Image (cartoon, rainbow, N blue to C red):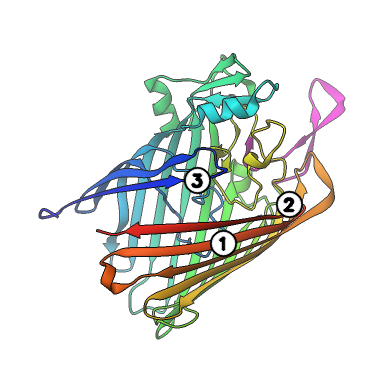
Amino acid sequence: TIHSWVFDTGLDLAVASGFTSAFVVQQAYADIRYKWLGLRLGSWEEMPTPLNHSLSSGGMSWSGNARPIPQIRAGFPDYITLFPFFKLKCETSYGWFTDNNFQKKTVGETDYKYVKNAKYHHKSLYIRIGKPQWRLSFEGGYTLDEQFGGYQMIGKEQVWDLGNTMKDYVVAFIPQSGGDDGPANETYFKGNYTGNEHFKFSYQLKNSTISAYMENYYEDFSGMGKLNGMDGLWGIEYATNQKQIINAVVLEYLQTTNQSSPLVIMVPSDVSKKDIVTDNYYNNWIYVSWQHWGMALGNPLLRSPIYNQNGYLGFPYNRVKAVHVGWSGDITDKWTYRMKLTYNQTFGTVTEPTLDILDNYSTFAEVTYMPQMTNGWIFTASTAFDTGYLYGDNWGIQLKINKKF
């Protein structure tokens, strides 16, 4: 720190087996801040919404489930006080998807589409209302993420140039139509949009906090207007600042079955025909899906495309109902733990439902050792397994060593 300047860097490398890459640069970034302004460059794991990301099932439009997207981000990364009871933070960024080769290899010789050299744009605005002496507080905001630009491909053939000039970066910041020379699905807005509306109320007790929250996912105005029924992530959270065997608990219900549908409309060119108008969460006709390196950028309970066996990079199982619980605690001063349990049911998509309900059970357990004599070294071991019809029976372990300087 030099006066009001703050500089920070991070590097996170991983070696994996049975993954998309044997060697992964998970994080590599530089963070520069001056007073309340921030500029960050590189790839980093981010959790933009005010969830308990160590225990939650994951945010609706961004969960940290996929590999980070390298980007340049600027704004107010931390809350700034405008009034004694009112705080605000906002950021915007541009980035670049890095999974061209993965998509090309996955699609292979099939007729499925993918987009190479796609770009990324992000906007977020959050507010916090409350004072330290108030027991009740509110936190809420909006995020808007977009895939834009790149080239739509079918096999080795380029089908569309989706816009790769500086003008397209401006259009991404201020959404506009794609014009008459682009794909038909970009007539209204150019690019693939996903977003969150987040609302959280917290009640402060003596040494703990109880919160209730909801994340509403949207891809268009029907979702923003909550025409998608009970769809969203609904949760309650308990957290304490005391060291005890259970210091935090999260209970969540996830639903994505409505998708603002079904709305049946007449086809103008032939009144004897009808179309079903619906959202199709995480799927897009042009950009295929909201994924990076095969993993869902949003909530991972919507099964990621990496599990598809036919070269399709979309989400064939995006209608889900799920119950999730996570809790953590302190075993001793040096040992902590974390547990998560999830049960979910999947119904396919609105237009292609499954014949039977596919259910799945998932479990995660983790222990962390933080010895004082090692001066910043942290050792973590975790295990997870799935059982059910959606993923099959799977089991895995992870060993992690961190060093904080």
Q: Are marks 1 and 3 in contact (CB under 8 Å)?
A: no
> Label 3: which residue?
16
Residue bounds of the magenta highlight: 260-283
Q: Secondary structure at mark 3?
A: loop
Instruction: Say whether disc 2 or disc 1 marks the residue closer to the N-terminus.
Output: 1
Which residue occupies the extreme right position in the image?
Answer: 272
Residue 6, percent from left and from top: 19, 52
Q: Magenta segment: does it hold 362?
A: no
Image quadrant assignment for residue 208: bottom left
Crowd rating for badge 3 (residues with CA inside 10 Å; few <14, some 14–19, many 20+): few
**Which residue is at 44% across, 20% downward?**
164
Whether residue 58 can be seen here? yes
Residue 104, percent from left and from top: 58, 25
Residue 262, percent from left and from top: 77, 43
**Which residue is at 44% across, 63% downward?**
380
Q: Amino acid at mark 1?
A: Thr
Checking the image for residue 383, the label placed there is 1
**Which residue is at 68% across, 52% downward?**
256
Q: Amino acid at mark 2?
A: Gly
Instruction: Say whether disc 1 or disc 3 marks the residue closer to the N-terminus.
Output: 3
Whether residue 237 can be seen here? no
Crowd rating for badge 2 (residues with CA inside 10 Å; few <14, some 14–19, many 20+): few
Q: Secondary structure at mark 1?
A: strand
